[in-house]
Amino acid sequence: MEEQQTVIGTIASVIYQNEENGYAVLRLVTEDGELITLVGCIPFPAPGEALSATGSFVVHPSHGEQFSADEVERRLPEDEAGILDFLTSGTVRGIGAPTARLLVEHFGTETLNVLENDPDAIGALRGISARRAREMSESFREQMGLRRLVEFLSQFELSAALAVPLYRRYGAAAMPTLRRNPYLLVDEPFRVDFALADEIALSLGGDAACRTEAGLLFELAHNESGGGHVFLPRDKLLHATAQLLNETPDAVEPSLDALLERGRIVEERVANVDACYLARCHADEDAVATRLRAMLADKPDVLRGAAKAIDEIQREQGIDYAPLQRKAVELAAQEQLLILTGGPGTGKTTSVRAILTLFERMGLDVLLAAPTGRAAQRMGEVCERDAQTIHRMLGMSWDERTGQVRFQKNEKDPLKADALIVDESSMVDLALMRALLAALRPGCRLVLVGDPDQLPSVGAGNVFSDLIRSGRVQTVALTEVFRQAQQSAIIRNAHAVNEGRLPELRNTAAGDFFFLPRRDSVRLVDTVVELCKTRLPEKMGIPAADIQVLTPTRRGATGTAALNRALQAALNPPAEGKHERQFGDTLFREGDRVMQTRNDYDVEWTRGDGSVGTGVFNGDVGQILQIEPDGTLLTIAFDDRVATYTADMLAELDVAYATTVHKAQGSEYRGVIFVAAPCAPGLEVRGVLYTAITRARELLVIVGDDAALRRMAENDRRTRRYTALRWRLVQD
């Protein structure tokens, strides 16, 4: 990387600025009188500003040499000439050149102070109305608020890009609000580590009660996002928060009671447990349970002639449905809510196609959806119909004011559908299920399809499993593995693992499942690289682009970080003209496979047909098409969408030649290489192994330690999630 250096100068002109994330391209006159191009995160820059920037010089093929700034300190102009340049640049709404001259002539070096603090004095000038003066002052205060936010954040080495979403949410009060409660940085969408927010608060002499309340809210949010818990028992919440803050549970309890009184936390007696919820989680769970109970009580009109129609569909498709398959189709004609489950090779796809055909034969408008783009694409292909992601179907958008997801389709504007079939339903978390149910008009049939033995949703809740275990929802579990499917070692071994048995590890000459024993981590990684680079492309006809390496863990010698470094070096090595960008410990290179690691509802994308939209989601996989030579912009293709990422967004990306099994949920690949090496006990479980095996469509190669495989197959321990949906459904 280039050596860091510092340049000091004055902004001569602004070539480009992005008000969404603060990225800007400037022309800067340095102290030596040299004119340079400077790029970086500099919200609302304006000519006349003095700044000091630390970074490095890079060469852009089209625009020549540029200075890429990592840190920037800014100062407003102090003399009349600089103030005039600043105001005539148009950076303050409502102030053009004539008005700028009038202000500077009248107020001199105090112009900017008056503009921020005394709009009445400006409104007293001839030709400027009081309303216009207030608007000019408001525009200037907005810029000052952003500037002070950036300066404040930089003191604690936080990204300047945080200033924009902070100002969006809190407006002119952002700075005093942040000073009063730095713990708000822990919340979505800022997601600053609690320890850092705590450090900021302690440096400002923060209020002890505020700290304790923040700790309680953080523990609930952390356990929601990290553990999938919808609530925590009161005693566990108190002890976890006390440990976080190095306090006693008794010292924390008054703050919990205060939050309960204000409604930030909701407590309810659930199955003999005092359950403490974040308010939105309680609202989500209650709304889902209420709507599901209503659907169960509201029996739809039975589709007349369904039995005859099913017979006709069988004849047309040349299929004799197995008894459970036929039962599923018949129940779909009778029930408003149906669950269809089954492992690989049990005929779920055939059953779904039959239900879809029956619904359409009966004149119903049917929608198909799945939680992820790849799952929706696969569903569309097997059903030969359009299928969408649930987010897209519901018209997801991001509310900048509240910092929350918003859906266009809801109770007031429901989906125009008589029936909805959702695949990979085990991936649907509680919040998304609430939005989905809210968008169904009364009487709409809902068929949830999935495999309850896969890992649960990344988000909070265990909705699919809770519905099944409640016993309230009609459920058809397909168990028979069809003869054709039995020929696949992938499918046979998936069922073996699900029954607690070790997969058959003996390799056959013509098979789709292979085991390569490797206990030494160095040799294991070398084998994985060799398989991806040469052996599978040359001997099995599966190119590297269609192979996904899966591992239970991110850490260690066989975790995703180590595997990705080795695979990147082998599959996409550096080359002349191939641009790169280093971000922390991760190197991104043009051509790399990458994965989005958190939901980002603000990312703008375009499709080849010219359509545009926003939102890239946790688990979406893409390829880096282009990196600007200065490293500030990356163009990434996610299936049929192309998005542009600025450098500050790279924290949301990982190189993805190898990924964790959890991140691969809902996806299917031609070839899968699963790394079976010792890892944390919580990851050596049957659900991880089963989910990994079922990601492979044509070929699965397991590389590693048979002892680790045995531990995984035998360990059916499932991480408990605190949810009460099942309990709510069985209440009278």
Image (tube, rainbow, N blue to C red):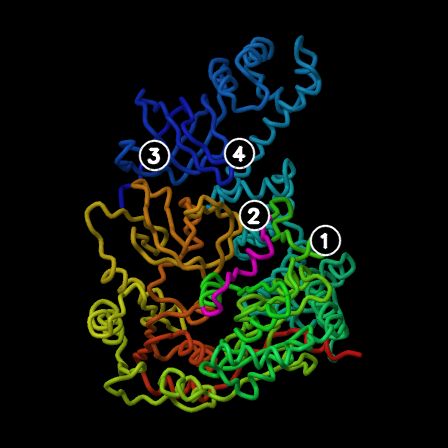
Which amino acid lies under the numbered mark 2 shown in the image of this protein? Ser
Q: Label 1 to label 2, Cα distance in Å? A: 47 Å
Q: Counting other residues with Cα less than 10 Å from the Cα at mark 2, is it few (<14), some (14-19), or many (20 or more)? A: few
Q: Label 3 to label 2, Cα distance in Å? A: 28 Å
Q: Earlier in the sequence, mark 1 or mark 2?
A: 2
Q: Measuring 49% from the left and 43% from the top, which residue is drawn there? A: 161
Q: Measuring 37% from the left and 80% from the top, which residue is drawn there? A: 678
Q: Quadrant of residue 248?
A: bottom right
Q: Earlier in the sequence, mark 1 or mark 4?
A: 4
Q: Which residue is mark 2?
A: 203
Q: Which residue is mark 1?
A: 412
Q: Earlier in the sequence, mark 4 or mark 3?
A: 3
Does the image show residue 216? no
| Towards the viewer: 627 or 315 | 315
Residue 671: where, in percent of width, then height?
Answer: 33, 72
Residue 236: where, in percent of width, then height?
Answer: 65, 73
Residue 47: where, in percent of width, then height?
Answer: 45, 22
Which amino acid lies under the numbered mark 1 shown in the image of this protein? Lys
Residues shaded magenta: 382-398
- SS at badge 3: strand
Q: Quadrant of residue 411?
A: bottom right
Q: Counting other residues with Cα less than 10 Å from the Cα at mark 4, is it few (<14), some (14-19), or many (20 or more)? A: many
Q: Counting other residues with Cα less than 10 Å from the Cα at mark 3, is it few (<14), some (14-19), or many (20 or more)? A: few
Q: Measuring 32% from the left and 83% from the top, which residue is drawn there? A: 705
The quarter in which the C terminus is drawn is bottom right
Q: Earlier in the sequence, mark 3 or mark 2?
A: 3
Q: Nearer the viewer, mark 4 or mark 3?
A: 4
Q: Which residue is mark 4?
A: 147
Is residue 391 covered in magenta? yes
